[in-house]
Amino acid sequence: MPHPSVTALMRTLPRVAWIIPSTLWFGVQFAFGSPPAHRVVFHEYALGKAESKKFPPTSDFPRQFPEYLQTEMREKLHPSIQSDIDSIEKSASDIRFRSEGLINNSGPYYSLWVRGKRISGRVLWVSGLQTIGKHFLFGVSIKESGAPESVKIIRDYGITDWNPRAHGDTDPVLMPDGWVELDTIGLVRSAMDSIQFAVTRNGKAEYRFKVCDPVRDPIQGFAGLDGKWILQIGDRLIVDGEDMNKRTGFPVIFSGRPLAGGLFYLAKVKDRGPYRAFRNGIPVGKTYEYVPHDFCCGSFMMNPRGTRSSVGFYGIRRGTWYLAIIDS
């Protein structure tokens, strides 16, 4: 039985779509100096009355949506491992994955072949592909018989063992001259213990920071765009060492990431709101009175979510919950 607040949604789903072309590139360009390669489209779906800020995004809530919206969310916001594999094989001609079946009748696993040689073990998941020109980088989780699951980074056919815990649970970020990684330096003992990290480029630390509470102020993301790195720490966004909260004056910035060739983030523009999405410093779509985002471990931990080409999030405006999807 659908939640009463989505009864209207089951009958009809109001939808708004705005196109934000790259020709809107004007004003302050923030950290990136060239126009985005792709335009983005803003879609909005009315979901029902906002009876509580705790509603709607429980894990099973999307199952109550009409089939076409479930399909759109699945394809744009929840890509399968096969879509990642297709992208990798398209970019790297000498890398091939072969489906080997299901693990315990659940998720699929694959064998991995690099330049005709099979890599020992079964591939359980693949992290997002990064490319710059002819260079590429991606991560794989591999399970070998009798051994714990391990992670390997593959860059231009070279294979590197990778310990995510030593790198803030992040992958390295591909750069034209190598890669940038997040390194755990150590534990700082004080009245409030903190973990110190460094952003390291080809072995040289170029930015240091500490996290006092990995649960309430965690590392949310580490990515790259146009030769710059993007680091999301709690409600702070750092781009190539520059504090974007200070630059924009926004007290809260979250979900910083590449989107369709530009820098995307959501922001609480003043202490009392509203919330708004931005791409390369240009507002996208509409404003919201509330856009929830938990770090751990509530219903909104995955809000927003998405990929390098699509982002989706829930928000409240004038007493109604909306689902917004921004894609290229």
Image: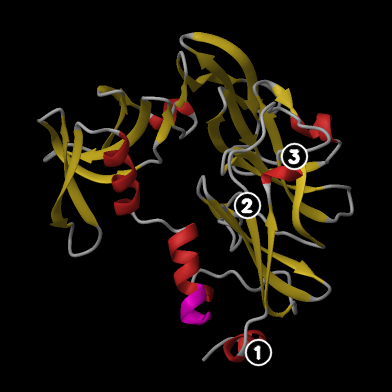
Give the main secondary structure, helix, strand or loop, of the magenta stretch.
helix
* Disc on the earlier residue, 3 or 1: 1
Q: Amino acid at mark 3?
A: Trp
The number of numbered discs placed on residues in the rendered structure image is 3
Q: Amino acid at mark 1?
A: Ala
Residue 24 percent coordinates (x, y)? 75, 45
Numbered range of the magenta stretch: 63-69
Name the mark on residue 8.
Answer: 1
* Disc on the earlier residue, 3 or 2: 3
Helix, strand or loop for disc 1: helix
- Label 3 belongs to which residue? 25
Cα distance between the residues tagged 3 and 2: 12 Å
Q: Amino acid at mark 2?
A: Val
Helix, strand or loop for disc 2: strand
Residue 162 percent coordinates (x, y)? 34, 26
Colouring used for the render: secondary structure
- Label 2 belongs to which residue? 40
The answer to whether the residue labelled 3 contacts the one labelled 2, judged by CB atoms less than 8 Å apart, is: no
Q: Is 116 included in the stretch rendered in magenta?
A: no
The answer to whether 102 is drawn above or below residue 141 in the figure is: below
Q: Foreground residue, 200 or 12?
A: 12
As drawn, the residue found furthest toward the front would be 23
